[in-house]
Image (spheres, rainbow, N blue to C red):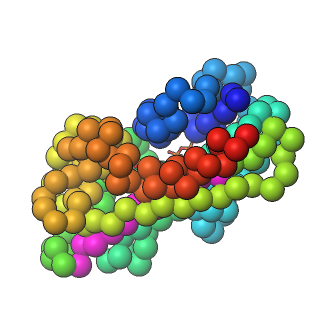
Amino acid sequence: PRLLFATSNQGKLRELRGLVGDSVEVVSLADLPPVPEPVEDGATFEENAVKKARAYADATGMLTLADDSGLCVDALGGRPGVQSARYAPGDDRARYEKLLTELAGVPDAQRTASFRCALALVGPGGGEAKVEVGQCQGRIGHAPKGSHGFGYDPVFILPGGDRALAELTPEEKSAISHRGKAFQKMKPHLLGL
Ligand code: ITT
């Protein structure tokens, strides 16, 4: 079946295309006439993912998958969390630079963080959403490094070493990422269609 991946984030779209492979034809928002953007005012990733999937499924009549994700930093009480895309104006770099500034002077042991992802799938006729989540643990580094990925990947250090998520190839990232884990749980729902 054709699947609408309802995101305007090119990084997410690239990763999902890699995860889906050739089994499903993926259409993105860029392939469709403009649809009004839903308001992401939910308190949780799950809630926002369902809001997005439902809004785009209603507007297009297509099987729709949406992703709401973000970075939860323990020393910041879980911020930026659901606000990750709006944490600072400007681009991804402006946002991870702000994070490094906020964490200046915080020792490594207290720089723990997790990426979270909620995927929501809504059928062409609406109805119940299928929701799956995934997490990836790590800590915030002291300077950006690596050129892969997107968003906060250059400042997210993986456990057991000093590698940033942005230093992993797309395949390596998807094997351990919040999005990859959520997608593996979502896969049976997609194949069952
Ligand atoms: P859509 O709502 O159109 O999907 P968005 O970028 O606004 O795109 P979110 O509201 O879910 O999406 O915000 C997620 C933000 O969290 C995203 O902009 C990144 O900054 C960050 N993020 C999510 N997944 C990430 C990942 O795998 N690596 C790095 N940063 C990530």
What is the x, y in percent for residue 175? 35, 49
Q: Name the side, left or right, on which 167 lies relative to 32.
A: left
Q: Tell me if residue 123 is in the magenta stretch.
A: no
Which picture quadrant has residue 6?
top right
| Residue occupying image coordinates x 37% and y 66% | 114
In the rendered image, the quadrant that contains the N terminus is top right
Q: Give the vertical position of 38 relative to 30 (above or below).
A: below
Q: Give the vertical position of 166 relative to 98 (above or below).
A: above
Which residue is farthest left?
Answer: 162
Q: Which stretch did the figure color magenta?
A: 110-120
Residue 80 visible, this orientation: no
Q: Give the vertical position of 104 relative to 154 (above or below).
A: below
Q: Name the side, left or right, on which 189 lies relative to 92.
A: right
Q: Name the side, left or right, on which 126 lies relative to 188.
A: right
What is the x, y in percent for residue 157? 22, 59
Residue 104 visible, this orientation: yes
| Residue occupying image coordinates x 58% and y 47% | 187
Please tell me which residue lies in front, 152 or 63: 63
Q: Name the side, left or right, on which 38 lies relative to 107.
A: right
Which picture quadrant has residue 41?
bottom right
What is the x, y in percent for residue 44? 60, 67
In the rendered image, the quadrant that contains the C terminus is top right
Please tell me which residue lies in front, 104 or 145: 145
Q: Tell me if residue 114 is in the magenta stretch.
A: yes
| Residue occupying image coordinates x 70% and y 55% | 130
What is the x, y in percent for residue 173? 32, 46
| Residue occupying image coordinates x 21% and y 52% | 164
